[in-house]
Amino acid sequence: MSIKPNPSHLAWHETMKLHEITASQTNSLIGFKMSIHNIKDKHLHALYAEAIRDIEQNLRELLPYFSEAPTGTRSLSDSELTAFYAGQLLGYAKSSILGYASAITETATPSLKETFHKQMHRAIELHTKVFNYMLERGLYPAYNLKELLENDVKNANKALGM
């Protein structure tokens, strides 16, 4: 069975990724443009110029998608909104943990590394609390693969049909 996406707007999860990538690339572009004039090595300067051109092209290609982002909750029920908000919070906690784990592997300053550890543990605690909240309310059937996958399909179709 072929499922056709609803072309009237983007799904919520892809809208968030669009936001994250655009914000990250915008910040990098600003930093690169501020730095390029201080780079004396010709080869490195050329690499910065290439990165700037690439990011500018990336942003030009991404910006039109913002007009396709969802603009509201549409017709979600209270329980569907609760599930969405809980999933959003769980996703935040997961990506925070991954971000801190990566940062820890690249940190040499002991006090900063300890700060990242402390913050990662808070993110892990949040993840545990949100996961348990969802599990207890039947919002995340983590131990039932069939139900989990059925929910993925149902939720994806609902998001696509919004």
Image (tube, rainbow, N blue to C red):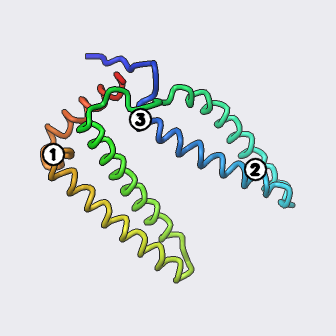
Say which amino acid is labelled 3. Answer: Trp
Query: Foreground residue, 24 or 51?
Result: 24
Question: In this figure, which residue is indicated by the disc labeled 2?
Answer: 47
Q: Which of marks 2 and 1 is nearer the N terminus?
A: 2
Judging depth in this view, the residue of 44 and 1 nearest the camera is 1
Q: Where is residue 134 in the image (x, y as percent from the top left)?
A: 22, 50
Mark 2 Cα-neighbour bin, 10 Å: few <14, some 14–19, many ≥20: few
Residue at the outermost front position: 78
Which tag is nearer the camera, tag 2 or tag 3? 3
Task: Report which residue position mark 3 lands on.
Answer: 12
> Given the image, on which type of amino acid does mark 1 rest?
Gly
Left/right placement of residue 25 relative to residue 84 reads: right
Residue type of the residue flagged with mark 2: Leu
Q: In this view, does 23 lie to the left or right of 7?
A: right
Using the image as rendered, state which of residue 133 and residue 160 is in the foreground. Answer: 133
Q: Are marks 2 and 1 in contact (CB under 8 Å)?
A: no
Helix, strand or loop at disc 2?
Answer: helix
Q: Is label 1 in a helix, a strand or a loop?
A: loop
**For the image shown, how many numbered marks are present on the structure?**
3
- Classify mark 3: residues with Cα within 10 Å, few (<14), some (14-19) or many (20+): many
Write down the residue under mark 1.
138
| Spot occupied by residue 85 in the image (x, y as percentages of width and height) | 33, 45
Q: List x then y, in percent, for residue 59.
A: 65, 36
